[in-house]
Image (cartoon, grey):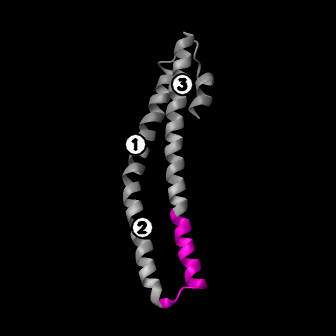
Amino acid sequence: EERVVVLHLFVVGATSGAILSLIYTMVFISQSLSVMVDAFCCDIVGVMHMQDVSRVWNTTQAVLRMTSDCMHGSLVALCVVLLVMVPLSLLDMGVLGTPSAPVQVLLPAFL
């Protein structure tokens, strides 16, 4: 029975850790894109000549579009995984949980 509890904790912890690392990666990429737009705006205000603005903005826009196209599939997949993982984890803790593995033990690993 202790092995089952350890296995439950390991599976929930590993799954949560993998999902959190994917979320962190997406947030990091999104922040980098935001900084890229901010740097473009600062360049316009500071040193860039108006002749170069169109070329630089087209490059910036192309990078933003390519990155958002790549992240779109990952974001949808992540949302689906989260929507499936939460009910299954709650079902596992509540209905299929062993008497030695109460929700209070598994809940911190899930969060």
Q: Tell me the element at label 1.
A: helix
Label 1 sits on what residue type? Val
Nearest to viewer (mark 1 / mark 3): 3
Q: Tell me the element at label 3.
A: helix
In this orientation, does residue 12 appear?
Answer: yes
Q: From what the image shows, is residue 65 above or below residue 26?
A: below
Q: Badge 1 is on which residue?
A: 80
Disc 3: CA contacts within 10 A as few (<14), some (14-19) or many (>=20): some
Q: Earlier in the sequence, mark 1 or mark 2?
A: 2
Using the image, tell me which numbered label, if any, was put on residue 63: 2
Q: Earlier in the sequence, mark 3 or mark 2?
A: 3
Residue at image location 50% in from the left, 26% down from the top: 11
Q: Badge 3 is on which residue?
A: 10
Instruction: Locate residue 10, reporting x and y percent.
Output: 54, 24
Instruction: Locate residue 40, reporting x and y percent.
Output: 53, 76
Nearest to viewer (mark 3 / mark 2): 2
Residue at image location 57% in from the left, 72% down from the top: 38
Q: Which residues are magenta?
A: 33-50
